[in-house]
């Protein structure tokens, strides 16, 4: 299995809702990432997990709460989001936080719309 | 990590070679050049990377100038499915810093 699987592919939520995005990989990668991508912009790093511990938080608002229950799974819990949080949320993994070969493997993303 | 400069958009005829330039004039000796691409509404996909020698794989070739201040990604026979945004990224392999994407080049392959 050489894929990163993200669910759901599309999500519409209200500003008072609580929802979660899920990311899964079975490549034995020990680093996992969340990126946010607005339309026609490059992806921006949000969080990095290394060996199931949060190692980087790029000053992301607390309404985004990451969780790494095990080495294969990464969640992003969403609460009280704003319409400007609507974006494509990408998950990625790598063998470590300092990959030498082949870089990162990205999922196809979750298209989030906040109404 | 060194900053990169890429043209915002390029067109290429189907079947012809697509040559995508990237300027990284402030690159350090231990920084690698990575290329990723992102097809519309999909996640970025790794293409190739190199340090100073030219590299080739099943997807593309990477040509790095001798002074390492610029590089060119070559798709030898572009197809419509190669239409995507191509990102050139330079970073230190083995560093704790993460992938930082620039603006990229929108490549459109025309029939």
Image (spheres, helix red, strand yellow):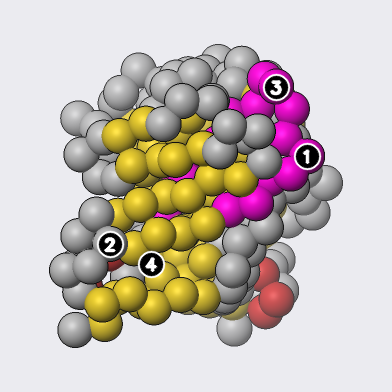
Tell me, yes or no, whether the two marked residues, 4 and 2, touch with CB atoms within 8 Å.
no
Q: Nearer the viewer, mark 4 or mark 1?
A: 1
Q: Which of marks 1 and 4 precedes in the sequence?
A: 1
Within 10 Å of disc 4 (Cα), the crowding (few <14, some 14-19, many 20+) is many
User: Dot 4 corresponds to which residue?
Assistant: B84
Q: Is residue A39 magenta?
A: no
User: Dot 2 corresponds to which residue?
Assistant: B17
Q: Which residues are magenta?
A: B22-38
Question: Horizontal and vertical percent for residue B65?
Answer: 56, 38
Q: Is residue B76 above or below residue B46?
A: below
- Answer with left or right where residue B89 lies relative to residue A9: right
Determine the residue positioned at 73% across, 56% down: A63
- Is residue A31 visible in this depiction of the protein? no
* Quarter occupied by the N terminus of chain A: top left
* Quarter occupied by the C terminus of chain A: bottom right
Identify which residue, A75 or B92, lies in the foreground: B92
Question: Horizontal and vertical percent for residue B24?
Answer: 68, 45
- Answer with left or right where residue A30 lies relative to residue B61: right
User: Dot 3 corresponds to which residue?
Assistant: B29
């Amino acid at each position: 299995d050489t894929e990163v699987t993200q669910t759901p592919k599309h999500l519409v939520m209200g500003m008072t809702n609580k929802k979660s995005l899920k990311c899964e990989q079975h490549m034995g990668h020990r680093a996992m990432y969340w990126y946010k991508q607005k339309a026609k912009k490059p992806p921006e790093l949000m969080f990095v997990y290394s060996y199931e511990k949060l190692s980087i938080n790029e000053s992301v608002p607390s309404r985004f709460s990451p969780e790494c229950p095990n080495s294969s799974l990464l969640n992003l819990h969403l609460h009280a989001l704003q319409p400007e949080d609507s974006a494509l949320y990408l998950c990625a993994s790598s063998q470590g936080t300092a990959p030498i070969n082949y870089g990162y493997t990205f999922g196809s993303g979750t298209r989030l719309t906040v109404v | 990590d060194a900053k990169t400069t890429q043209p915002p958009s390029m067109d290429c005829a189907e079947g012809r070679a697509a040559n995508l330039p990237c300027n990284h004039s402030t690159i350090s000796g231990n920084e690698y050049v990575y290329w990723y691409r992102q097809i519309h509404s999909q996640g970025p996909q790794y293409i190739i990377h190199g340090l100073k020698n030219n590299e080739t794989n099943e997807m593309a070739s990477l040509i790095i100038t001798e002074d390492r201040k610029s590089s060119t990604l070559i798709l030898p026979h572009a197809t419509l499915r190669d239409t995507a945004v191509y990102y050139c990224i330079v970073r230190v392999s083995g560093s704790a810093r993460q992938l930082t994407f620039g603006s990229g080049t929108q490549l459109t392959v025309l029939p």
